[in-house]
Amino acid sequence: MELWQLDATDLARLIRNGQASAVEALDSVLKRLHKVNPAINAVVSVYEQEARTAAETADAARSRGHALPPLHGVPVTVKVNIDVAGKPTDNGVVGFKDVIAHEDSPVTANVRHAGAIIVGRTNVPAFSMRLFSDNALHGRTLNPRDPSVTPGGSSGGAGAATAAGIGPISLGNDIAGSVRVPAYVNGVVGLRTGFGRVPSQNPSGANVGRPSGFVLMAVQGPITRTVRDTRLALEIMARNGGRDWRWTHVPMQGPPPARPIKVALVPEFPNTKTHPAQAAAVRQAGKHLQAAGYVVEEILPPDLERIIDLWHAICVTDVLDRLWPQMQKMGDPNGIAAMGAWLELHKPVDLSTYIDALAEREGVLFRWMSFLQQWPLVIMPTLAELPPKQDADTTLEGQRQLLDSMRPTLVAPTLGLPGLAVPVGSHGKLRTGVQIMAMRNREDLCLDAGEVIEAAEGIVTPIDPVAA
């Protein structure tokens, strides 16, 4: 097995034990990148020289007998909307291509401090607000499993790179599904962390106030091929909050819930067309957990439909409406068409309705906290439908169907909960998959359940891109 095929846990162990060097690991990943990236355009900036210098420094540190951090010498990628010192944080926008970050974001700094080597940056849609990673600056990312469907967004480059073996960990972020959807459509693992668990502040935007919807719902999270790598990446990404006031330093392992752990399954999201393969994946995940001693029941958590209304009332009003003038001025044609259709279907609300939505959100949270005390895990599809065809969101009807499919992804961000996307089953060339949600700061429960499912389904291994 070549080094690029390994997950981060095994690769770090080999480097630590002297069975591989950081330079060898980097060379292997770069060779893989140069072989497959031209077919998928997942990594849009490659930092080969800087990465090689870092790898040589890492090997020198090991030779001197220094204590080695957990990701020592492991190549990783970082999304282009996350600050990397000395590099552009362009967010897929031509007008931002020269916006240079003067320091690392906290998550970038955390993975560097853990010994990881940044080999490049992954693609996004313009302004990171679309489920298709295509923009006028970097071009289109293709799904390595099926180039006719989306690679996801906004962390689509991260999902495609991880699936194709360009590094075992990629850093992404999620306000409406932007980690979980790319994980689902590319058939890998993705964790949307809960509110405050991982710092989500970019120094390049520190002096600009962010909309309330962004503050409450946008979080950082890793995309990996194994659940154990997700656990490792989470522990590292959450270590130091920098200047993000939302960050909370809490244990990675919470108090043990009552046994057996109860799991609420939602195979079909209410009033949403759910593909039978996605519903079957949820039920199959339930069977895997039941075989491991969990108690599983199909039961609806409270207020599911209202939660979707609240996401749109809050985020369309202050995130999309604020971005819309910039998108019209600096976005690409498909991004403009997609956002315009979204705003036509879900119009911004007036101030009174917006304030009422924020207040109602807290009431829903109270009811969900009560529910999660009885049912610590909730499992539902990631998207209700199969991955959409490229540019399906550029027409009004196409955007309507896509937003309907997205309804399950909006629950976790609206409530600030963690959500872990894991593959379960398959449909043709694609994987089907589920998301596992738990109470805030209980990513550990999601990961424990994810490992049970992964043990039954098999470890995800890198794939060669399918020809377009």
Image (cartoon, rainbow, N blue to C red):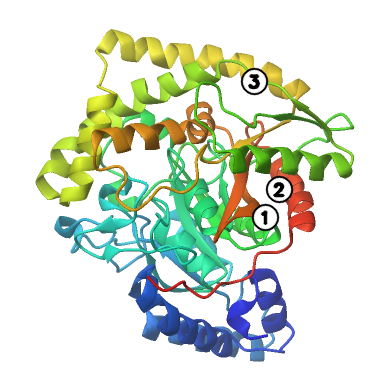
Q: Residue 420 in the image: x percent, y percent?
A: 61, 45
Q: In the figure, is residue 298 to the left or right of 127?
A: right
Q: In the figure, is residue 166 to the left or right of 420?
A: left
Examine the image and state in which quarter residue 169 appears. Answer: bottom right
Quadrant containing the C terminus is: bottom left
Nearer the N terminus, badge 2 or badge 3? 3
Q: Residue 229 in the image: x percent, y percent?
A: 65, 62
Examine the image and state in which quarter residue 34 appears. Answer: bottom left
Identity, as a three-letter code, of the amino acid under mark 2: Leu
Label 3 SS: loop
Above or below, 253 relative to 134: above
Residues at marks 2 and 1 touching, judged by CB atoms closer than 8 Å: yes
- Looking at the rendered structure, which numbered label has been put on residue 447? 2
Residue drawn where x is 51% and y is 58% of the image: 186
Quadrant containing the N terminus is: bottom right
Is residue 210 in view?
Answer: no
